[in-house]
Image: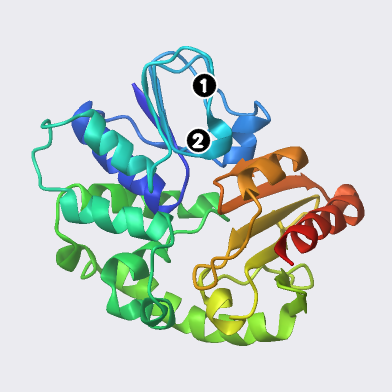
């Protein structure tokens, strides 16, 4: 039996829960949602998929993304929920050996962006939020770290986890990254109407940082479009779209919109990945839809 999930904080916590509930020792298979959508992931009988699109070959499936809902029969659970981890936590009821209630509560808040302005500006004061920012899905070289977090969060409270030497170093790196990222956002974000557009394609290596920060920098906007290359070969582009968490006046169902562009997600946030050759067509279409529905 194998856990198949995505490398974000919700995915890591899903893996923590599933490993305990099903007594799984096999390494987690970390994959991106677009690879699942494109049929590029080898799913086999016995696999438990969490926080990712459904695949008929799996044995169990748990998800909460609006665009991933399926009419096909499956074992597991799907519902619109603040996090996929919440669904797994409730599905297995009283099977837990440890008290995961605080971890699930914080996963809900982070994955649904239920955060205060103070938390966004100073994530170092919230250990769960800061820890979540150390998890990025840009490089398979980070798999060892994701697996380490699954192990740590399954055994220790957050205060002990954040004292782990590697976690401590990555958290310190995130604080510095966020400082630089603020300047990058200010320099590389264009405002059109009530839409902010952050284009990170000019960078040789995509800068990383606090994904909520853009909403605090441009409070007059209601939605952000973030454009980057998927990896160093620049063959594919990833466009992420998210409703502002401080100015909640965007009327667009992001997941439904991005499903038209090889993507998907929630009502308030999602992403799509497509060949770079389609950028001149797809990106203006996405921005136009947002502009027409956010005025």
**Identity of the residue drawn at 16% across and 31% down:** 93
Dots 2, 1 in contact, CB < 8 A: no
Above or below 60: residue 221:
below
Q: Which residue is mark 1?
A: 43
**Identity of the residue drawn at 71% across and 86% down:** 187
Query: Residue 119 has which mark?
Result: none
Residue 137, image x, y percentages: 53, 53
Residue 203, image x, y percentages: 74, 73
Q: Can residue 59 be seen in the rendering of this structure?
A: yes
* Distance of label 2 from label 1 (alpha carbons): 12 Å
Q: Which residue is mark 2?
A: 52
Viewer-proximal residue among 70 and 62: 70
Quarter of the image for residue 86 reads top left
SS of the residue under disc 2: loop
Viewer-proximal residue among 291 and 189: 291
SS of the residue under disc 1: loop
Left or right, residue 27 beside residue 64: left
Q: Can residue 19 be seen in the rendering of this structure?
A: no
Residue 68, image x, y percentages: 55, 32
Q: Quadrant of the C terminus?
A: bottom right
Residue 37, image x, y percentages: 64, 31
Mark sitting earlier along the chain (2/1) = 1
Left or right, residue 283 beside residue 124: right
């Amino acid at each position: 039996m194998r856990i198949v999930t995505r490398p974000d904080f919700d995915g890591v916590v899903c893996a923590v829960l599933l490993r305990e509930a099903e007594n799984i020792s096999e390494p987690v298979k970390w994959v991106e949602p677009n690879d699942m959508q494109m049929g590029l992931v080898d799913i086999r009988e016995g696999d438990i998929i969490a926080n990712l699109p459904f695949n008929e070959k799996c044995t169990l499936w748990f998800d909460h993304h609006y665009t991933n809902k399926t009419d096909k029969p499956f074992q597991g659970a799907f519902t619109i929920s603040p996090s996929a981890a919440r669904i797994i936590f409730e599905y297995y009821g009283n099977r837990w050996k440890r008290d995961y209630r605080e971890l699930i509560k914080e996963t809900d808040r982070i994955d649904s962006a239920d955060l205060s302005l103070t938390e966004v500006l100073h994530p170092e004061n919230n250990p769960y939020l800061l820890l979540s920012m150390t998890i990025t899905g840009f490089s398979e070289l980070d798999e060892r770290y994701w697996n380490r977090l699954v192990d740590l969060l399954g055994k220790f409270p957050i205060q002990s986890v954040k004292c782990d030497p590697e976690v401590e170093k990555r958290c310190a790196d995130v604080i510095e990254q966020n400082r630089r990222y603020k300047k990058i956002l200010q320099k590389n974000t264009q405002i059109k109407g009530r839409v902010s557009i952050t284009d990170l394609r000019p960078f040789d290596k995509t800068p990383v940082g606090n994904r909520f920060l853009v909403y605090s920098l441009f409070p007059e906007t209601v939605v952000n479009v973030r454009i980057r290359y998927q990896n160093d070969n620049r063959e594919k582009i990833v466009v992420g779209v998210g409703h502002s968490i401080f100015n909640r006046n965007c009327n667009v169902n992001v997941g439904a919109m991005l499903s038209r562009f090889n993507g998907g997600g929630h009502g308030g946030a999602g992403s799509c990945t497509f060949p770079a050759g389609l950028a001149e067509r797809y990106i203006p279409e996405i921005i136009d839809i947002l502009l027409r529905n956010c005025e």
